[in-house]
Image (spheres, rainbow, N blue to C red):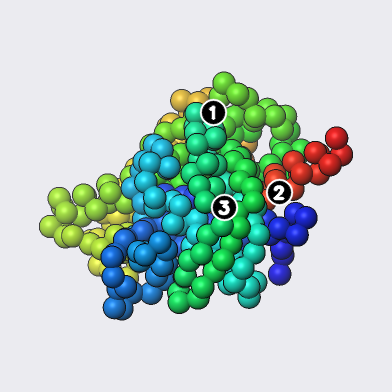
Amino acid sequence: MESFNINGKLLIGIDHGYGNMKTRHAVFKSGVKCYALEPAIASNVLEYDGKYYVIGESHKVFIANKNEYDDYYILTLAAIAKELSFRGINTADVVLAVGLPVNWMSNQKKEFAEYIMRKKEVDFKFCKDSYHIKICDVKVYPQGYAGIVAALPSYTGVNMLADIGNGTMNTIVITNGRPISDKIFTDKLGVHQCVKRIYNALQAECGKLPDESLIEGFLRKGTADTSHRILSIMQMEAEKYTAEIFDKLSEYEYDPELVKLHIIGGGGCLIRNFGAYNSENVEIITDICATAKGYESLYLTESRMKKGA
């Protein structure tokens, strides 16, 4: 079990995605539904401040500011509970390492940290177990970039990072291991856009209203247990989406002969299954928890630098 402690405090990296919440040891959907009374049959229920929250039955829709609603705070508590449960403990002093899209860091970094640290000591229940935590510190780092920061010394020449999440694609150009500040881009071109297009195509061409889980499973695995007609439509739409991804990257001066492309995030499986690319100059980082782990590494590096200073 890998675990990091900062002066007796447990370090937890949390990747607040629109599709999934990720920590070092857990992945769950970012959905939250609030109830005044305890749901009769739901699992993954978080009880906090007199309300009940069902966690992980759906994804979040795209919102430009994650601290506008309470949902990501509730999801943060669930993520902490999962990490504590993994370690077999119910109480801890924690420091949190989290992230935002690079282009949003300047405007939202301080507010997002305050949003998560709104209450330093918190009591809640998750899956019937009681938890008591003290949030001692929150640091906010660049999303996506954190997942590859350990490998940056090997990024010689011109590289491009595409972090394809459920809501957005964040792109960073990296030259000789250094991100270029005026070549950072955020587009609303996440995986959910592809899911919606497939859903609409199936409705228009077949009169079908599939559950989104069928589409999500198809995108993740490259196939699904359904008819050839349905599969062919989903395949066509997925290929069009991945072609649009590469068109957008080309706008940012991606040239497969000159630039090494690194893809991180849930969208990597779409590129792998449906994209037209040369695997010699495209790296798909398959660890969905890589960014959460990267936040922890950045926090540790920052702490060590401060001690050295």
Answer few, some or many: residues within 10 Å of disc 2's Cα (few below 14, many 20 plus, some between 14 and 19). many
**Relative to 83, 75 lies left or right:** left
Say which amino acid is labelled 1: Ser
Residue 172 visible to the viewer: yes
Q: Toward the viewer: 13 or 194?
A: 13
**What residue did someone put label 3 on?**
120
Say which amino acid is labelled 2: Ser
**Relative to 222, 263 lies left or right:** right
Answer few, some or many: residues within 10 Å of disc 1's Cα (few below 14, many 20 plus, some between 14 and 19). few
Indicate which disc residue 106 carries. 1
Answer few, some or many: residues within 10 Å of disc 3's Cα (few below 14, many 20 plus, some between 14 and 19). few
Q: In the structure shown, which secondary structural element does the residue marked by tag 2 occupy?
A: helix
Calculate the distance from the C-alpha at mark 3 to the C-alpha at mark 1: 24 Å
Q: Is residue 290 above or below residue 123?
A: above
Q: In the structure shown, which secondary structural element does the residue marked by tag 3 occupy?
A: loop
Residue 273 visible to the viewer: no
Say which amino acid is labelled 3: Lys
Indicate which disc residue 297 carries. 2
Calculate the distance from the C-alpha at mark 1 to the C-alpha at mark 2: 21 Å
Q: Residue 100 appears at what percent x and percent y? A: 52, 40
Q: Is residue 29 above or below residue 282?
A: below
